[in-house]
Amino acid sequence: MATDDSDSLLDRLPEPDLDIEAPDAYAVLAGLFTLHLGSEMAYAREPSVIWGVASIYVFASALVLIGAGVSTVDVRRWGRPLAGAAFVAIMTALGVTYLMIHGSPINTDALDFVNIAAEAILSGQSPYVVSMQSGGEYPTPMMDGGHVNQYSYPVGSAMLAAPFVAIAEDGSRIAVLLSTVVIGALVIGTASHELAPLGLFSLLVGDFITWGVSDLTDPLWVAPLLAALYLWPWSRVGRDSLRWSAILFGIAMAVKQQAWFCAPFLMLWVWHERGRWTAAKYVATVAGTFGLIHLPVFVLAPEAAVVGLLTNLYGPSGTLVHLGVGVSALTLSGAFPIAKGAHTLLMGLVGISGVVAYWHYFERLRWLAWLAWAPLLFFNYRSLANYFIVCAPVAVMLLNARLGREPEVADAA
């Protein structure tokens, strides 16, 4: 027969500590995703001391992050060095991975074409007139059953890769890896201790941090975009330099088309805050930077350059197939095929509505200017997953820019 004092075990335990703060959760998330990356490394095991040390470093960093998050270690005081150490560990491992795959074929036509375009530039040719054949596993299909064999990006990506292609046959991979280093330094280095683990987590979403050895190109344009945000006059993490911010943004536009969609919104921001003449100077600096980078290819082959720049946006002659995770998924699934003209109309409507809403609700929406490609390309007939994955590090950098590094816990005396 039960007695009155037969309290349950839960009643005899101390009250649970429910004071779990966001920085702790960020540290745990970053640690979990670092474990995931480490597990992927484990499947690529090589008889190399360097590989073994890198693997140990990555797993140790993951365990330290998780331990900091679930213990009473003050992440608000140690978040940045913890995240920074883990980032260095991962980039070290990726550097080792690059050495392991160096010389192997580039598997995506996107990065392969950048590599070939860089070779064309080094030989004094316009990459837009060079016929390109990728030996990779993931070519871009066309409506006629073939694959894209022409360079279809702004020339800045090839120019960034050219110095590395001059010293290595797959130098474009090095360019992407170094761009990732710049991104990590900006996202983690400008963060408060509280947000630094979240910054590392953002680099691990969709394996963004591994794109340098996964043959994707987006870090090439995200790096100058974040550098432009760092120098944006209304950012709380860098110095006020609208001119250099405009130059860096012009470079981002000259690397990949996604940055183009941010331009009208950033112009409206400058106009709203500093007047139309300053906005005009900002536009002139951005356009001048973009034009100067593209001047050689426009001189060599203007028509080919225009077609190459616009191919991914509207697909001349209807050559490119629907591909993506946005509205184009309706066509891919066969559920509700949509013509490319309808996609263009949708993008136009969303763009016009977005500009009007941005000006009218500027105080609430201002920071969304730096993510403008995402809602617009969601309606494009080509809306690849990587177009949206890149939002992760940009979003955290925007938080850094809005909030700065304060408040932080002061060091103990």
Image: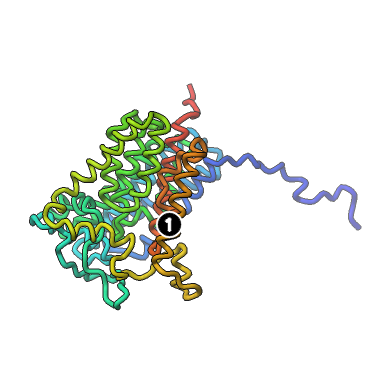
Of residue 5 and residue 123, the one placed in the foreground of this image is 123
Mark 1 surroundings within 10 Å by alpha-carbon count, few (fewer than 14), some (14 through 19), many (20 or more): some
Task: Give left or right: position of 150 versus 207.
Answer: left
Q: Residue at x 23, y 61 (%)?
A: 307
- x and y percentages locating residue 120 in the rendered image: 12, 58
Task: Give left or right: position of 124 versus 63.
Answer: left
According to the image, what is the colour scheme of the structure?
rainbow
Looking at this rendering, what residue extends furthest in the top direction?
413
Name which residue type carries label 1: Met
Q: Is residue 49 visible in the rendered structure shown here? A: no
Q: Residue at x 19, y 70 (%)?
A: 133
Quarter of the image for residue 71 reads top right
Image position of 245 with respect to 93: above or below:
above
Of residue 58 and residue 49, the one placed in the foreground of this image is 58
Q: Residue at x 42, y 35 (%)?
A: 401
Q: Residue at x 55, y 41 (%)?
A: 22
Quadrant (top left/top right/bottom left/bottom right) for the N terminus: bottom right
The number of numbered discs placed on residues in the rendered structure image is: 1
- x and y percentages locating residue 321 in the rendered image: 35, 70
Q: Is residue 160 visible in the rendered structure shown here? A: yes
Of residue 391 and residue 13, the one placed in the foreground of this image is 391
- x and y percentages locating residue 389 in the rendered image: 41, 55
Of residue 236 and residue 378, the one placed in the foreground of this image is 378
Looking at this rendering, what residue extends furthest in the bottom direction?
145
Residue occupied by mark 1: 347
- x and y percentages locating residue 370 in the rendered image: 40, 44
Looking at this rendering, what residue extends furthest in the left direction?
123
| Local secondary structure at mark 1 | helix
Task: Give left or right: position of 335 versus 108.
Answer: right
